[in-house]
Image: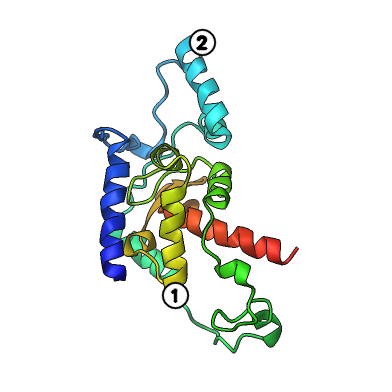
Amino acid sequence: TFAEFEDAVSVWMEEVLALKGPKRSVEPRRPPRGGVRRPSPHDGQYDPQEASRIQKLYRINRKKAVREVLGGDSLFCAVEGSRVESYYRKLFSVGGYTLGETPEEVLALFPDAESQSGDSRLLAAMDPEEVSLRLAKMPNTAPGPDGIPYSILKKADPGCHILAAMMTRCLREKKLIDAWKTSNTVLIHKRGDPSDLDNWRPLTLASCVAKLYTGVIADRLGRRHR
């Protein structure tokens, strides 16, 4: 059954997570009074170790390296949780318009999965090679609630045979692992008054396996409509 398959996937993902080693306890960095960033002890001085660290980070994740050089660590959002929840519930609530039927022109772009006339390439078994190619293209972003980054997936399943088999099962049964549906959302400070929620940008951290799965499907759709 799919439930048994899901349990097996959970066990495998726990084994993959163990490859990261013991989790270090890190306290979130809170801003000092006034929401001002704490200056680095090396401000104004050349630190060869820090320079080497930034160079290595740049080779792995350019965007993160640039953010560190230009702005340092992001502020910690100290706004009360209930206020944050109320703000985003209101922001993302549906209202003021109704959803009509999907235009036929749009539906024509996506063949019926039950139809024999549908493009079989979209529903074919996931090939380890196509999964591996997509995995190589994925940016080095933070992992979702499962804590598994792309780098560990590459280490745990170098040929992407396990990942391809898991994704094929999900594709054929038209179901998704429950753990892949959850995500964490963090607030990134943009500018201005830290107490104003308009000055924060929500960033969703979803499961890397789920993003890899949707990435492979997106690749197939892209090839079909070229």
Q: Name the residue under label 1.
A: 93
Q: Is residue 59 left or right of residue 177?
A: right
Q: Which residue is drawn at 64% across and 65% down?
A: 221
Extreme right residue here? 226
| Residue type indicated by callout 1 | Ser
Crowd tier of the residue under label 2, counting other residues whose Cα lies within 10 Å: few below 14, some 14–19, many 20 or above = few
Residue 40, position as x, y percentages in the image:
42, 21
Which image quadrant: the C terminus?
bottom right
Of the 4 image quadrants, the one containing the N terminus is: bottom left
Using the numbered discs, state the Cα–Cα distance from disc 2 to disc 1 in whole angstroms.
Answer: 49 Å
- Above or below residue 14? Residue 219 is below
Q: Position of residue 154 (x, y in %)?
A: 45, 40
Quarter of the rendering containing residue 223: bottom right
**42, above or below 29, in the image:** above
Local secondary structure at mark 1: loop
Q: Which residue is drawn at 67% across and 80% down?
A: 106
Identified at 51% across, 46% down, the residue is: 190
Name the residue that disc number 2 marks.
46
- Residue 91: x and y, percent? 46, 69
Nearer to us in this view, 158 or 209 = 158
Q: Is residue 203 visible?
A: no
What amino acid type should be assigned to the residue bearing mark 2? Tyr
First of labels 2, 1 by sequence position: 2
Density class for disc 1 (Cα within 10 Å; few <14, some 14-19, many ≥20) is: few
The residue at the point 53 percent across, 51 percent down is 131
Q: Is residue 108 visible?
A: yes
